[in-house]
Image (spheres, rainbow, N blue to C red):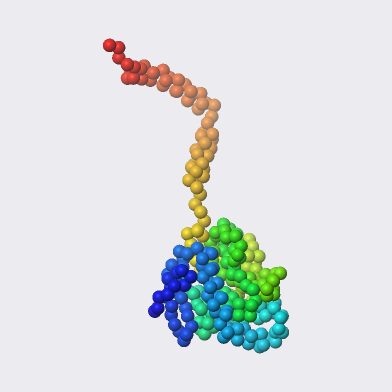
Amino acid sequence: METMNVGGMRAKRVNLDAAKTYHLPAWGETSDPKRIAILRKIALASGRDPRVATVAIGIFRDNHIKPRDYENQARVLLKFVQHRIYYANEPGERLQDPAYTLRVGYGDCDDMALLLAALCESVRLPWKFVISGRRGNRVVRWVEGDRYTPARWAHIYLAIGNKPFAPTRWLFAEPTLRTVDLGWDVVAASKGGTTPLPELSGTDALAGLGATTGDKPAAAPTEDKEALTVRGVIADVRKNLTPRRIVVGMLVGFITGILTRPLVNLVFKPRRR
């Protein structure tokens, strides 16, 4: 296998009938914004391949979509990926070139998102990558281009603009579920701690993007842990304090002080010469 550089990362390229797949051993150690940048680089390169545009136009014609009917163009591209590509989890992380995914007919969420992005790019439909995951007990998302906030990301999909050049609306596009339409939102559908996507169901489900060091919930600062401990001790002391114990404690302290003072003076008082 040929070793190459993909977005500044070392990768091994596998050539299968002129279609590429990338195995990235260090994928889980890379920040999410950098990973999204790598995915965008692959999608842009593939989307500018005229063969991908030919596939997209064929999808439009097969579904009788009129020119400039951009929303329905996005809809049928989404349906194509949902129904023609078999969703499958994978061990570790491989990135498949969209041409490879088309050839083999299967992939995980990032492979399907890459293919949908390349198809949109080939006909100039605006698109963004979206990742979703958990922050505490909530399912949250990050949209490419927005300010990044760490979470335990587990899934990737797209947001597609309603028209080229100057989109006024962005519609979520979930390629791994065959029963949802353009605009369906996994975050809105994940309420009360339940979600239709197993990879978002818990903190251990890190398929797809995986988790980087920055994605892990930050440990409580040392000061907070100490404060919690001090508060616990104070609570225990207050619980155990009674008037009787206070009086006994004062008497013991007074008597102990009387008895220990001569001993202290004996030891530390300077001798007269």
Residue 237 placement, left or right of 173: left
Q: Is residue 126 left or right of residue 245?
A: right
> Which residue is found at the position 50% from the left and 43% from the top?
223
**Is 176 placed left or right of 72 in the picture?**
left
Residue 263 visible (yes or no): no
Q: Position of residue 128 (x, y in %)?
A: 61, 70
User: Quarter holding the N terminus?
Assistant: bottom left
Image coords of residue 123 (percent x, y): 63, 80
> Which residue is outermost to the top?
273
Quadrant that contains the C terminus = top left
Which residue is at a point 66% across and 85% down the rendered structure image?
A: 60
Q: Nearer the viewer, residue 207 or 54?
A: 54
| Residue 130 on image: x %, y % | 59, 68
- Is residue 80 or residue 201 the one in the foreground? 80
| Residue shown at 63% from the left, 61% from the top | 192
Q: Residue at x 57, y 79 (%)?
A: 47
Q: Position of residue 132 (x, y in %)?
A: 58, 65
Question: Is residue 254 something one can see in this rendering?
Answer: yes
